Image (tube, rainbow, N blue to C red):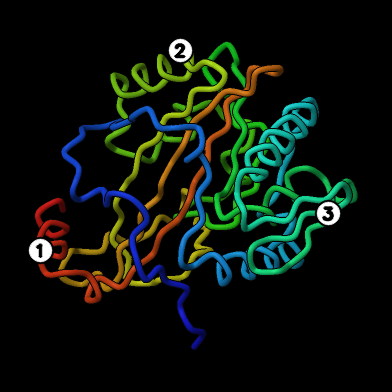
Amino acid sequence: MHTPILQSVFPGTPPWQSERNLPGLRRIDPADWLIRDTAFGAQMALRDRLVADRAHDVLACLPGAEPAARECLALVLGHLKADPGYRMGTASVTRPDGVPVTLGKAAPMATLARLVQSDICILHPGEGGHVLTAAALCFPASWTLAEKLGQPMDRIHDPVAAYDTGLARRVQRIFDQLRPGHVIARSNLLLYDDPDLYQPRSETAPRDPVGSEAAGFIRSERQTLRTLPESGAVVFGIHTIVMRRADLPRDDQRAIMEAH
């Protein structure tokens, strides 16, 4: 059995310590848009393997979305210039774990997947709401990119019971009101008995619910939203945190059980 990739410290405020209701979004400093944490090296090594071995499953870019993908990559590269862990060059970027990522040879979404810990999804505005048009999704939490690509937000969240019509309208208003340079964020909390980061599942074969007593791991997604100024597309970032529940302080374990 492979060694699980776990964070030793939760980056930021854990969701079980927040009393925000759905969608629970808050404005954050753009400097905190994309973060890296204690699992950076191990997560990035897995991302490299997935891009090399399962590119068809973890990368996608619909026709017409290429300009937004290139714009997103340029925005990410600009963001990384402020991170002293990255060594920026004209032809490549060396990550904090010492791995160089060549620029210009691979498609933008493949390059994005290998540069940062966060999964990156790009959504374009459409008649029925924002549509998923491109993604670098290495760490799906029980969903598959193939089933969601080209779908609007309400269809993407169709299996999510809490995502009702009222919440869908609130989320769409937030998307519509996003302005370039603004970044908003939220975190969720999921209970898992399997710590694997790559967990794709079809809507026809959903994950069985895991009770708070049986769950050995907590999985949390730090989700961010920002608008690309030229294309108007929205970038949805997903930074995944997995921790062993038994390693958390007792007060946190108690709060997690109460949250579920």
As drawn, 243 above or below 66: below
What residue would you read off at disc 2?
Answer: 177
Amino acid carrying mark 1 in the image: Asp
Residue 161 pos. (x, y %): 29, 38
Q: Residue 116, position in %: x, y?
A: 62, 53
Labels 2 & 3 near each other (Cβ < 8 A): no
Q: Pick whichever, 144 or 215, lies toward us.
A: 215
**Residue 251 — which label?**
1
Name the residue: 41% across, 18% down.
Answer: 174
What residue is at 35 percent from the left and 38 percent from the top?
186
Three-letter amino acid code at disc 3?
Ser
Cα gap from disc 1 to disc 2, whole angstroms: 37 Å
Residue 94 in the image, given as x and y percentages of width and height = 74, 60
Q: Earlier in the sequence, mark 2 or mark 3?
A: 3
Q: CA distance from mark 3 to mark 1?
A: 45 Å
Q: Which residue is mark 3?
A: 92
Dots 3 and 1: beta carbons under 8 Å? no
Q: Amino acid at mark 2?
A: Gln
Q: Tell me the quarter of the picture where residue 51 sits.
A: bottom right
